[in-house]
Amino acid sequence: MARRAIGLARFALRVRGIHDSKISIADAKRLISEGVHNRATRFLTKLEVAAYSNPKSPYLKLLMAAGYQLGDVENLVESQGLEGTLRSLADSGVYLTYDEFKCRTPTIRGSQTFRFSPSDFDDPNMFAESYGSSGGTGGDSVETKYASETVYQFTPHWALFLAENDCLRKPLSFWGPQSSGASSRQLACSRFNQPLGPCFVSEELTDFTERFYHGTKRLIAERVGDFPRPESAPYGQESIVLAKVGEVLARNGGMCLNVAPSAAVRISLAAQRRGINLEDLTFLLGGEPLTQARRRAIEASGAIARPLYGSSEASWIGGQCSHPEHPDEVHLLEDNYAVIPARPVESHNGGPVPLLMTSLQRVTSKILLNTDIGDLAILDSRSCSCLYGQVGCSRVLHTIRSSDKITDFGVNFAVADVCQVLEAALPCRVGGTAGDYQLVEERHSSGLPSYNLRISPRLPDVDCEEVVRVFFEELSKPRTYYAYMVNTWRRAAVFKCFVGEPLATRAGKMLPFYRPGFAFKPSLRPNRVASKWLKRW
Ligand SMILES: [Zn+2]
């Protein structure tokens, strides 16, 4: 509580300065371009401060185990460039797998075994003013921290993304779970005078302390900017958002809405059911993968889908330009990150590979040095005449998916394959669309899992037995050994199917595959007086 109170006080002191430090699009381009030009220097500075001068750093231990002093790394950068240096470091054991980064397994290099904790990865440059938690398919919720400086850092990336996608003069709205993230984004966008549209909250925090904290931060931000008050619009009630979107479109002729792809799919489906064309709406999509199936469902409404790529531990990894070559292609923000494939690309037959990510910004939520953040992607490079190409960001990532696996009873399904069946194969064969099917993993006190296949109540006359039959049939196809594993699941009798709305993660994501631990659960049930008071936040 004390550190959060201090964080809020610091934010209150700084918020006016952030809001009033205006930048132009030309400034944003220049700042990113300079960052790309100086990325090797940024890397070495970050390495010196966050690893070599930080005795807690897991990366310092790995560097020492591999025999690298700072001068050795400087020489490598001089002779091999940044990506060459990172490759050499990775080949010498200076990297972390996703499970090592999440502290699920010890890190073993040669004869040495290291046991890290999540806070070991915190950036010593960061004095946290606000807090959030990661949420994904992985099952581990880790606190992440934010400071005012990160708002300064990501403002140019928002400006470039909106400018490239012709959204600068269009009202920008947000729809997502209650958090301090929307306030930070509004604050960043106010620095380049982006008009702001209505803001919607899908899930209100149930923990009193969290709600008070985020509400206070929002009120502090509102004191300096004309930020719209959030309106309640739970997932499942997308008609509330759609009605407001219709009003803004009628008044302004265009708008952009920052949401998760699953929420965008719901709005698009609601619009199609009502015969509303969303051709003047641009969805700015983050937080979940934008699969081909989701993109198709969104674009069927006439809306434009533009993904940005980032995670709680690594914000603003990339943004899509206005002429992508793949549905989810993003330009890597090379001033922010350096990325290399974890293993030689040839071993994956041209498919997505695990990525090793290195953060270059001065202040980051988590320090990353050749760190696998749990995603696979195809890493490529191409010349592009867009704004990203103009500032030197020629590397692109596409076919981005989670590297997580479902492993029980000796089976080993890639979550990405399961999601493909849920989002594409099932809708194609038994009806519905992406977002109508969700597989929920439950873990019992015995440690054994069970799996519930939830089918959206939107779908009429659902035959659960038929859905399960098709699900197993399709899940047998992606890899030859899946057929054997599907039979194992069948025999273990751990699979149930019923009609129910999809569950949201703690971060408000509506993922096709869901692990518990992220659901919004009341951790404190407020009494009647507190409930009344809470409505003000
Ligand atoms: Zn481009």
Image (cartoon, rainbow, N blue to C red):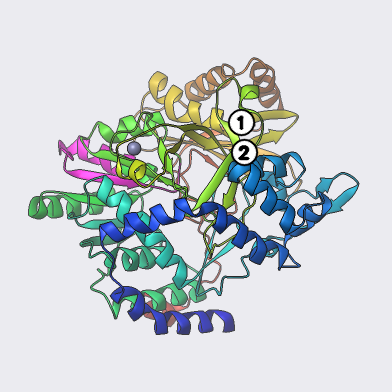
Side of 347 where 157 appears, left or right: left
> CB atoms at circles 1 and 2 under 8 Å apart?
yes
Side of 106 where 16 appears, left or right: left
Give the image quarter of residue 85.
top right
Query: Hey, what amino acid is under mark 1?
Result: Ala
Extent of the magenta region: 265-288
Q: Residue at x 62, y 49 (%)?
A: 139
For the residue pair 485 and 463, the one nearer the viewer reads as: 485
Q: Which residue is mark 2?
A: 404
- State whether residue 188 appears in this view: yes
Task: Report ligand 1 position as a quadrant.
Answer: top left
Q: Residue at x 59, y 50 (%)?
A: 358
| Relative vertical location of residue 298 with respect to residue 480 in this rendering, above or below | below
- State whether residue 205 appears in this view: no
Distance from disc 1 to disc 2, alpha carbons, whole Å, reads 6 Å
For the residue pair 357 and 303, the one nearer the viewer reads as: 357
Q: Which residue is mark 1?
A: 414
Q: Secondary structure at mark 2?
A: loop
Whether 495 is among the magenta residues is: no
Q: Earlier in the sequence, mark 1 or mark 2?
A: 2
